Image (spheres, helix red, strand yellow):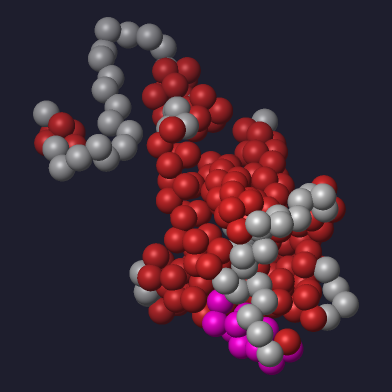
Amino acid sequence: MEKLKRYTIFFIGLFINSLGVSLVTKANLGTSPISSIPYVLSLNLPLTLGQFTIIFSLFLILLQLFILRQNFKLEHLLQVPVSIAFGYFIDLTMILLKLIHPHSYIFSVITLLTGCLVLGFGVYLEVLADVAMLPGESFVRAVTFVWNTDFGITKIIFDVSMTVIAAILSLCFAQRLDGVREGTILAALSVGFIARFFGRIFSFAPSLLFGTPLQAASAAAPLSDTNIIAVEQQFGKSENEIRKK
């Protein structure tokens, strides 16, 4: 039952994530770094953003196979249906948002900020579900696992690389920058902070949705006169002292 709940939350988050990507794209100020290469290709070749997203995601999964080798587990293949669903969600939300065409820079900025907010909430739901990762994040995790690099720094390098490659492709196809603008930078800098912001606001959600270790312990053991204190998270430097006491 809990696994079903987690997957339901994950796919809701995946759809909201795709809605955020479409809103950011509709702002016409660039798109998110992970979508920049598929977007540039969709502007110049006869496939949709969602279709190129699926192709690019499958390419990232293949790279993970070469990087991880014997450490590539069966569970990594879960990224394949997730990538296909994400691609179709993007095409669906692009159709749902077809009437949005910003005619002024202010309207474009508002659309962009709304998209970043929606995208951040979608990422938060995916993290909350904790059952699968999109190929972009999973690729970064594979690199950090094999070469023992810092995840945050590796993610920044990955996002910058995607943006630079998208810019080069755009210059090669159209001799101008399409799909890589100030919105790409804003999305790269803000989405992570927005996701963490939602995590703080809804800090009660994991306990409410999935229960806590304390609840599990109290359900499994009979009541007694023994007092149990559970310290579940690190709130500061004094946590270890609290545990000792």
Give the vertical position of 3 relative to 173 (above or below): above
Q: Nearer the viewer, residue 209 or 183?
A: 183
Secondary structure mostly seen in magenta is helix
User: Is residue 169 shown in magenta?
Assistant: yes
Which residue range is magenta in the image? 163-173
User: Residue 102, position in %: x, y?
Assistant: 70, 55
User: Residue 55, position in %: x, y?
Assistant: 76, 73
Give the vertical position of 86 relative to 237 (above or below): below
Along the horizontal axis of the image, is 138 left or right of 42? left
Along the horizontal axis of the image, is 75 left or right of 209? right
Residue under the image location 53 percent in, 60 percent down: 187
User: Residue 25, position in %: x, y?
Assistant: 68, 61
Residue 218 seen in render: yes
Give the vertical position of 129 relative to 205 (above or below): below
User: Is residue 153 shown in magenta?
Assistant: no
Name which quarter of the figure residue 75 lies in.
bottom right
Q: Nearer the viewer, residue 69 or 221?
A: 69
Name which quarter of the figure residue 146 lies in.
bottom left
Residue under the image location 39 percent in, 24 percent down: 214
Along the horizontal axis of the image, is 190 left or right of 65? left
In the displayed orientation, state which residue is furthest to the right.
Answer: 46
User: Residue 173, position in %: x, y?
Assistant: 73, 89
Q: Nearer the viewer, residue 233 or 74?
A: 233
Q: Quadrant of the C terminus?
A: top left
Residue under the image location 56 percent in, 28 percent down: 209
